[in-house]
Image: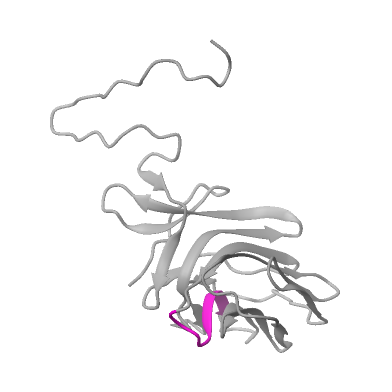
């Protein structure tokens, strides 16, 4: 027997009044998924408030069934009025910030997984996608005073969800000052089959379930 080799099989436990749902190496009560998909009516209201000098990394897939503006994540703060929108339009990945405007361009990338990154630093904002390359803007995001959290599968505009995302999210990482602060993993809750995102950094699934 060597390290990493399979040895035998795990038993199937039994207990009166309970149903065994299987063994897992993930968080008890949840099943890890490859992705979760939005059809344009759901969103996730997180408790994550964007800070200055942050970076967003996401693996996303936009369905060709929808060509209008559709945001997989975003927020416009009700206190400062500053907006951050991570979105597609016509199948092209973009970033929009208030007051900087739109960053992005290139060809449409429907029906494929795209690695999407936006970096906010003290010198400006950079959008990179694995399909359409790099775009820069001198917009410096200042999160001081922000009180409104990110919405996923939609854009949180002063507390009201809009631009619902039609597509899949395979995972989102949020860095704060170069440190990974949130690692959002697609999951299904075993007790009720509710879909959502589990944060492997904070070990939390609160405020990350899909709202229909």
Identify which residue is drawn at 20% across, 35% down: 19
Identify which residue is drawn at 71% across, 89% down: 99
Q: Which colour scheme is used?
A: one colour
Residue situated furthest top in the rendering: 1
Give, as a single range, the part of the protein colored magenta: 65-77
Specify the quadrant of the image occupied by residue 9.
top left
Q: How many marks?
A: 0
Specify the quadrant of the image occupied by residue 112.
bottom right
x and y percentages locating residue 109 in the rendered image: 59, 74
Can the viewer see residue 131 in this picture? yes
Is 5 left, or right, of 174 in this rendering? Answer: left
Give above or below for 76 relative to 119.
below
- Between residue 125 and residue 48, name the one nearer to us: 125
Specify the quadrant of the image occupied by residue 75.
bottom right
- Between residue 125 and residue 3, name the one nearer to us: 3
Can the viewer see residue 77 in this picture? no
Is 138 left, or right, of 96 in this rendering? Answer: right
Q: If the image is split into quadrants, where does the C terminus sit? A: bottom left
x and y percentages locating residue 143 in the rendered image: 69, 74
- Is residue 27 on the magenta stretch? no
Give above or below for 123 relative to 172.
below
x and y percentages locating residue 171 in the rendered image: 54, 57
Residue situated furthest right in the rendering: 123
Identify which residue is drawn at 50% across, 70% down: 152
- Is residue 66 on the magenta stretch? yes
x and y percentages locating residue 162 in the rendered image: 46, 84
């Amino acid at each position: 027997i060597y390290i990493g080799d399979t040895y035998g099989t795990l038993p199937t436990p039994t207990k009166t009044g309970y149903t065994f749902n299987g063994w897992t190496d993930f968080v008890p009560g949840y099943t890890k998924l490859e992705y979760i998909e939005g059809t344009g009516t759901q969103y996730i209201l997180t408790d994550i408030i964007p800070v200055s000098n942050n970076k967003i990394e996401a693996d996303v897939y936009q369905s060709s069934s929808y060509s209008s503006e559709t945001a997989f994540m975003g927020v416009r703060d009700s206190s400062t009025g500053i907006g951050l929108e991570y979105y597609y339009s016509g199948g092209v990945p973009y970033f929009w910030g208030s007051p900087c405007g739109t960053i992005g361009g290139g060809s449409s990338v429907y029906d494929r997984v795209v690695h999407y990154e936006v970096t906010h630093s003290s010198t400006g904002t950079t959008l990179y996608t694995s399909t359409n390359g790099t775009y820069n803007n001198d917009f410096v995001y200042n999160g001081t005073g922000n009180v409104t959290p990110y919405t996923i599968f939609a854009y949180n505009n002063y507390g009201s969800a809009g631009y619902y995302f039609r597509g899949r999210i395979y995972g989102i990482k949020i860095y704060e000052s170069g440190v990974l602060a949130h690692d959002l993993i697609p999951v299904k809750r075993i007790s009720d089959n509710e879909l959502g995102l589990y944060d492997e950094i904070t070990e939390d699934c609160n405020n990350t379930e899909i709202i229909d």
